[in-house]
Image (cartoon, rainbow, N blue to C red):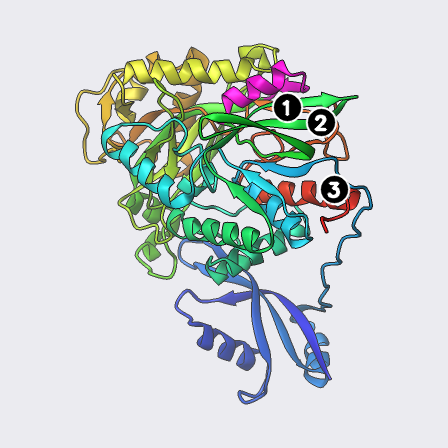
Amino acid sequence: MEQTLLIRNIRREPDASDEAFVSSCKKRWGIPADEPLRFRIVRQALDARKKQDICFVVHAEITADKRLIQKLLKDRRLNAELTVQKEEEPLKQGTEHPDGRIIVVGMGPGGLFAAWMLARYGYRPLVIERGKRIEDRVRDVETYWSCGRLDTESNVAFGEGGAGTFSDGKLTTRIKDPSIDSILHQFVACGAPEEIVYLAKPHIGTDKLRQVVKAMREEIIALGGEVWFSSKLTSFEKKDGRIKSVGIQKEGRTEKIPCGALLLAIGQGARDTYRMLFDSGVAMAPKAFAVGVRAEHPQSLINKSQYGEFWKHPRLGAAEYRLTGRSGERGVYTFCMCPGGKVVASASGENQIVVNGMSNYARDEENANAAVVVQVGPEDFGTDPLDGMRFQEKLEATAYAAGKGTAPACMIGDYLEKKPTQTFGSVKPSYRPGVQGADLWKCLPEYVAQGICDGIRSFGTQLKGYDMREGVLTAVESRTSSPVRILRGEDRQSISVAGIYPIGEGAGYAGGIVSAAVDGKHAAEEVIRRFAPEK
């Protein structure tokens, strides 16, 4: 008879291969080398707090004969406990028959996992996405990055996979939810690296994430779902406080479709959709978020600061950071750090400049980048539900003007001295098709500009070299999270229109790929508990 034991906080040397690590564990625990057992890493985190003694800290599950497991369990030197594998219980499906189709709007992580969950249970959802499939979208984005020609319906914000597809593919999240495990395993089933299920800071990389997104779409279709690209939600009708139908614009015409449940995963870039929903009586509220710039440094500088003499070690990878500070009463912090990545153009409308960060799986570009952002709230931009969105639009238009149609940027040293940059130094801006040297203090509200200044000075004391003169700041990072929350109840339905399920980052209930995916999955579960599947 076999049992499974979880052993926590096992030290692993950076040089140790998987085979060497298992062998050393056996020797350390007094297990004969030929003793049969199954060894599975369930969590691995890098401990770089002591630069002279960097190591990985591992939690591992060992499955072996009960006799051996009981022996290890009694060893007080080990932080160990028996584990029981739990199967995910199937949902109890509802009996109500929907008065129309179940429709998912948006194919970011929230929409993808809502549609996947519905398709798994036989609901044959209709999934609509205003942008294009990933293969075509990649070409449109590359055109924008290379020559500045923007497709307003196929870009970094709109299209299959959502905005996260052109990012670092980070899967870290602060939420604690049992569904995270199933989300990560679905990513792996669709082609993501297997390590994401156990690394403390997993990432897929934009190059691999594109293939994962395509595989998920194909699985949804194979399970009976239907996907429409270049199709936009333009209206809806309600009766007795409940949604009855939707208007979908496709191929130059609008089609009216009866709708029993509408899962809204619109993403935060869909400003025209926000306006339509607001004008149609969907309850919303303004939400605090953060704005600022993208900061670029040599990745080698970050590695040296974080890893010390181990900075070139091949198993440690590109180093990350997360820094926080204060500017008066406001928080200042780094956000969405992309090791070995690029700053990318992320606008979704004409005459806008929006920047974001992106890394491939290898994280092997010359620069590291991260947003440096300052908290803003309704007290800064107004209490109307759409005032935060208008605040973003103004910032993006100001950046466009300051950059003369491209992104305004300056060196950190010039920024701290409140001077415009004429030429750049050793750190080459990675934004394409190119940046315009500018005075970024003129691109931002005074309190945001001062907050960034205070933050960089503070970060320079936390991470050696962060305030280096020739580092680059590029504006404007304006879409850290949604400026709007579409209000919903405990059943995840809109408090004003029954049958509408606002989900994900665009609805104001998530802050990254995993949290959006979990939110979409839970919204689908509510639909499943209510309705019977199609026959």
Which of pointers 2 and 3 indicates the residue nearer the eye? 2
> Residues under labels 2 and 3: Cα distance?
16 Å
- Would you name the residue on which mark 1 appears? 236
Per the image, is 282 magenta?
A: yes
Seen in the picture, residue 401 relative to 289 is either above or below; the reply is above
Q: Amino acid at mark 2?
A: Ile
Seen in the picture, residue 104 relative to 330 is either above or below; the reply is below
Callout 3 secondary element: helix
Residue at the spot x=47%, y=46% of the render? 170
Residue 75 appears in the figure = no
- Would you name the residue on which mark 3 appears? 526
- Would you name the residue on which mark 2 appears? 243
> Residues under labels 2 and 1: Cα distance?
7 Å
Residue 103 appears in the figure = yes
Q: Are marks 2 and 1 in contact (CB under 8 Å)?
A: yes
Q: Position of residue 118 (x, y in %)?
A: 66, 48
Residue at the spot x=71%, y=48% of the render? 534
Which of pointers 1 and 3 indicates the residue nearer the eye? 1
What segment carries the magenta color?
269-287
Q: Amino acid at mark 3?
A: Glu
Q: Position of residue 320 (x, y in %)?
A: 41, 45
Q: Position of residue 406 (x, y in %)?
A: 27, 23
Residue at the spot x=68%, y=68% of the render? 80
